[in-house]
């Protein structure tokens, strides 16, 4: 072997280290970020992520280069060959052989259906390993030029991706919500919508039918069990709840969202115009601006009020853990992906639990700051194990941070994880890191846990003296995707054998709806009047005596039990194609007349095909 001079060693070490470091810490994470802006509402924006990625990459490159150039020639060449092979392996699986597993939205991944992918990955892995062992010198010779070439390719690819997604990046930066007043309420009047994602109404009926359940928790509430959601997924249930508008594929999805949230039926917009603080804390992206909500922040204002401190900001750190998990999932071969995904509990997320994150941050604050922030102290309401669940965490933070300061009335919209799969919480509030199997029994146990938390939510409002002067709606945004309705607990029976409704599970269209009016002092009540999530806006405006000339929906409290008005539910898939297209490829509209739990009440109206221009 020819002896290498220091200059040659440095150039080869730098190029190979750059290839590995930039691929792992810059190119792949930014690629994941830019291609998932619609899937993940990152607290961190692209510029902050770029700065942090460059910093981490730079540190890795500097350290690895120093280690490499300090080795003797033979060891140096061996290490370069190994490092380059590893970098090439990561680049290949992260950019060339990228398997599509669908959206990470709770839909189970059928791993056995993809075993062939694992075999292909294994063959490529063995081939690269053989090259490294038997063609080590050739690999070393190619390392420098190939590294530089693939860095340039990735740089160009990333630049093109950023350019084609510049509007999405802009939207992600601009649509930042201020969480500083998340738990601040009005002294005089509050309207609160608490969404428990995927809470199917028959689970509630089954639970309250059991002798051990204390229905007094929901005194003052009316349970509208003859309810429909409008949609089987959160994406369009959220605008239906907040604007009473149905998406029917007649316009692009983004156009619809803007038109709906700026319309005269938009709850937050109308309440804001009538002197309310209107704060929305959704689970998914939606349209917002200064005219539609109070907790919207412009990009400049956002950066001024929320300084970026990676080691002092839990939101950003959780973003990076999430991004690191997805990046790891992308670059690893198929047979490792299952363990990284871990039924959506994710590998790094499970290792870096909430308890560890809180401990980490408490060490970076002075003692007084630690005492003033109860959420980082030892939990008073829940165990450390339970606090890993997002629903429990919300109630814990509400208990610690709630304050009653506003003189003006306030509107609060909270969207919790609820029963959305995977589910981790059992009826005793025990958190299961590997998630519970998705059965009716596990969903029922999870529903019981959520009702315990909801009871705590109500008690916290009572202790603060704001329960009586609040209009409270506790709702599901839709039902479950594959758990059938327990019709028996409703007291109704099918009078005929209705034909099957294609691939529709009517449970997905049956959300929980509980409503407590202002100053309500009644026993728990069950109503079978036909309602929909579209009636929420009219119910709120009626309670406030705000006239709505163009409102086509009625208040739930003003609907007659014998009302024959048909309700609408649009069934659709929510996979990658539906998520990324301008329109939904296919929707099926159903009309519901009668008791919504009965299959015989559902009628297929029409199929609607989207026009993707």
Image (cartoon, rainbow, N blue to C red):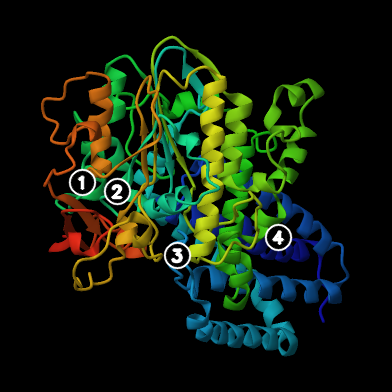
Specify the quadrant that holds the C terminus: bottom left
Tell me the residue at 59%/52% (across/down).
Answer: 427
Q: Residue, x 56% and y 61% (percent of image)?
A: 344
**What element does badge 4 sit on?**
helix
**Do callouts 4 and 1 mark residues in contact (Cβ within 8 Å)?**
no
**Residue for badge 2:** 236
Q: Residue at 18% x, 36% y: name it.
A: 559
Does residue 468 appear left or right of residue 588 in this picture? right
Residue 260, visible in the rendered structure: yes
The residue indicated by pointer 3 is 107
Where is mark 4, residue-wise?
14
Mark 3 vs 2, N-terminal side:
3
Q: Going by the image, does 383 lie left or right of 599? A: right
Image coordinates for residue 562, horizontal then vertical, percent? 14, 44
Q: Do residues under tags 2 and 1 come within 8 Å of each other at their CB atoms?
A: yes
- Seen in the picture, residue 351 relative to 221 is either above or below; the reply is below
C-alpha gap between disc 3 and disc 1: 24 Å
Q: Residues within 10 Å of mark 3 (few under 14, many from 20)?
A: some
Task: Evaluate if marks 3 and 1 touch, with contact meaning CB atoms under 8 Å apart.
Answer: no
Mark nearer the N terminus (3 vs 4): 4
Give the vertical position of 294 relative to 493 (above or below).
above
Q: Is residue 417 above or below residue 280?
A: below
Q: Between label 4 and label 1, give the one nearer the viewer.
A: 1
Q: Position of residue 599 (x, y in %)?
A: 24, 64
Tag shown at residue 246: 1
Q: Mark 1: which secondary structure?
A: loop
334 on left or right of 603: right
Residue 360 location (% of width, % of height): 76, 40
Sequence-first tag of 3 and 1: 3
Q: Nearer the viewer, residue 208 or 587?
A: 208
Give yes or no for contact between labels 3 and 4 (Cβ–Cβ under 8 Å). Answer: no
Whether pointer 4 and pointer 2 mark residues with C-beta atoms closer than 8 Å, the reply is no
């Amino acid at each position: 072997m020819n002896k290498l001079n220091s200059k040659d060693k440095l150039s080869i070490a730098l190029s190979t280290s750059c290839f590995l470091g930039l691929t792992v810490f810059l190119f792949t994470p930014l690629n994941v970020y830019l291609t998932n802006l619609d899937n993940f509402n990152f607290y961190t924006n692209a510029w902050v992520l770029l700065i942090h990625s460059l910093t981490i990459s730079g540190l890795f490159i500097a350290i690895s280069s120093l280690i490499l150039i300090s080795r003797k020639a033979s060891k140096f060449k061996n290490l370069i060959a190994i490092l380059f092979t590893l970098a090439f392996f990561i680049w290949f699986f992260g950019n060339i052989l990228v398997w599509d597993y669908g959206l990470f939205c709770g839909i189970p991944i059928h791993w056995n259906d993809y075993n062939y992918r694992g075999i292909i990955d294994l063959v490529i892995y063995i081939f690269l390993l053989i090259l490294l062992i038997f063609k080590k010198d050739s690999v070393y010779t190619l390392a420098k030029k190939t590294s530089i070439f693939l860095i340039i390719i990735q740089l160009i690819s990333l630049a093109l991706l950023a350019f084609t997604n510049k509007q999405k990046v802009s939207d992600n930066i601009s649509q930042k919500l201020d969480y500083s007043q998340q738990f601040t309420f009005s002294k005089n009047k509050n309207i609160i919508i608490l969404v428990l994602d995927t809470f199917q109404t028959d689970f509630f009926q089954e639970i309250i039918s059991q002798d051990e359940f204390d229905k007094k928790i929901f005194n003052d509430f009316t349970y509208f069990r003859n309810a429909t959601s409008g949609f089987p997924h959160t994406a369009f249930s959220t605008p239906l709840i907040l604007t009473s508008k149905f998406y029917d594929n007649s316009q692009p999805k983004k156009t619809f969202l803007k038109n709906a949230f700026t319309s005269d039926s938009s709850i937050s917009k109308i309440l804001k115009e009538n002197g309310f603080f209107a704060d929305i804390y959704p689970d998914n992206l939606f349209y917002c601006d200064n005219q539609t909500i109070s907790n919207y922040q412009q990009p400049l204002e956002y950066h001024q009020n929320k300084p970026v401190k990676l080691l002092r900001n839990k939101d950003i750190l959780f973003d990076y853990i999430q991004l690191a998990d997805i990046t790891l999932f992308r670059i690893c071969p198929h047979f490792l992906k299952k363990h990284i995904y871990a039924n959506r509990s994710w590998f790094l997320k499970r290792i870096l639990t909430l308890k560890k994150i809180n401990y980490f941050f408490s060490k970076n604050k002075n003692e007084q700051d630690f005492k003033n922030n109860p959420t980082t102290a030892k939990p008073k309401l829940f165990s450390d194990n339970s606090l890993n669940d997002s629903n429990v965490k919300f109630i814990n933070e509400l208990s610690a941070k709630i304050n009653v300061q506003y003189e003006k009335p306030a509107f609060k919209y909270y969207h919790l994880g609820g029963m959305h799969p995977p589910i981790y919480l059992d009826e005793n509030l025990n958190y299961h890191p590997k998630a519970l199997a998705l059965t009716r029994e596990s969903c029922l146990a999870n529903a019981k846990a959520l009702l315990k938390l909801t009871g705590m939510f109500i008690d916290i409002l009572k202790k603060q003296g704001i329960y009586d002067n609040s209009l409270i709606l506790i709702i599901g945004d839709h039902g479950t995707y594959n758990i059938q309705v327990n019709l028996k607990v409703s007291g109704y029976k099918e009078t005929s054998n209705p034909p099957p409704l294609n691939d529709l599970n009517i449970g997905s269209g049956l959300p929980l709806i509980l409503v407590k009016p202002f100053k309500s002092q009644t026993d728990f009540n069950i109503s079978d009047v036909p309602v929909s999530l579209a009636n929420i806006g009219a119910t709120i405006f009626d309670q406030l005596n705000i006239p709505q000339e163009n409102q086509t929906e009625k208040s739930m409290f003003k609907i007659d039990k014998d009302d024959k008005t048909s309700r609408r539910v649009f069934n659709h898939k929510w996979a990658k194609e539906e998520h990324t297209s301008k329109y939904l490829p296919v929707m099926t509209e159903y009309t519901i007349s009668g008791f919504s739990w009965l299959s015989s009440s559902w009628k297929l109206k029409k199929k609607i095909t989207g026009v993707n221009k």
